[in-house]
Image (tube, rainbow, N blue to C red):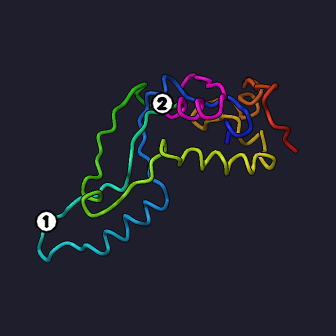
């Protein structure tokens, strides 16, 4: 939504935090696959990871920035987390059972941006500016310190 209204993307710290992603259709499909393929009686527990891809935050911001031309703001990280982390996860079991993932770089990101732009005029800028409950300053103090790209921002009513 930040990109849809021309507001700089917020990335905390280095952006090296890795996150897992799954489209809601794929999530529903994973449930369908799991129900259709119950474990055999007395079989061992089998773990199925319901995700389709991972991205570190800075790479995701780069994808969005490339699609929209909006800038990225790297802010000091108010969270108590490592600056960089790996997320080693796979979904081979779901893939083997027929999951055909919808990936961000294969059109999903463009679809999300189209929807966000459609509703950009309804966006409340005070709600889109980055804030974190992990830090001591009040929301008002944080909002005052955030830069806005005046030349590309959509007017908020």
Q: Are marks 1 and 2 in contact (CB under 8 Å)?
A: no
Instruction: Locate residue 8: give its quadrant.
Output: top right
Residue at image x 55%, y 44%? 109
Q: Which residues are magenta?
A: 58-77
Task: Give residue 132's position: percent from left, percent from top.
Answer: 61, 36
Label 2 element class:
helix
Say left or right for 30 vs 149.
Answer: left
Check the picture and name the quadrant holding the N terminus: top right
Residue 134: assigned label = none
Based on the displayed image, in which of its 4 quarters is residue 30 positioned? bottom left
Q: Residue furthest bottom?
A: 41
Location of residue 60 with respect to 106 vertically, above or below = above
Q: Residue furthest front?
A: 106
Q: Residues within 10 Å of mark 1 (few under 14, many from 20)?
A: few
| Residue 12 magenta | no
The residue beneath circle 1 is 44
User: In this rendering, is residue 128 above or below 36?
Assistant: above
Of labels 1 and 2, earlier in sequence is 1
Q: CA distance from mark 1 to mark 2?
A: 37 Å
Residue 69 is a magenta residue: yes
Q: Nearer the viewer, residue 92 or 89?
A: 92
- Quadrant of the rendering where the C terminus is positioned: top right
Q: Which mark is residue 59?
A: 2
């Amino acid at each position: 939504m930040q990109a849809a209204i021309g507001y700089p993307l917020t990335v905390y710290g280095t952006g090296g935090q890795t996150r897992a992603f799954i489209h809601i259709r794929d999530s529903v499909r994973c449930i369908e696959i799991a129900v259709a393929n119950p474990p055999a009686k007395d079989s061992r527990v089998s773990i199925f990871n319901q995700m389709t891809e991972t991205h570190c935050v800075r790479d995701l911001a780069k994808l969005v920035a490339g699609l929209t031309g909006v800038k990225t703001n790297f802010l000091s990280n108010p969270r108590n987390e490592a600056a960089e982390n790996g997320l080693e996860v796979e979904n081979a079991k779901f893939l083997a059972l027929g999951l055909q993932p919808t990936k961000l770089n294969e059109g999903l990101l463009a679809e999300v941006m189209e929807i966000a732009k459609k509703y950009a005029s309804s966006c409340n800028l005070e709600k889109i500016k980055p804030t974190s409950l992990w830090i001591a300053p009040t929301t008002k103090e944080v909002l005052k310190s955030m830069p806005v790209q005046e030349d590309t921002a959509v007017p908020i009513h």
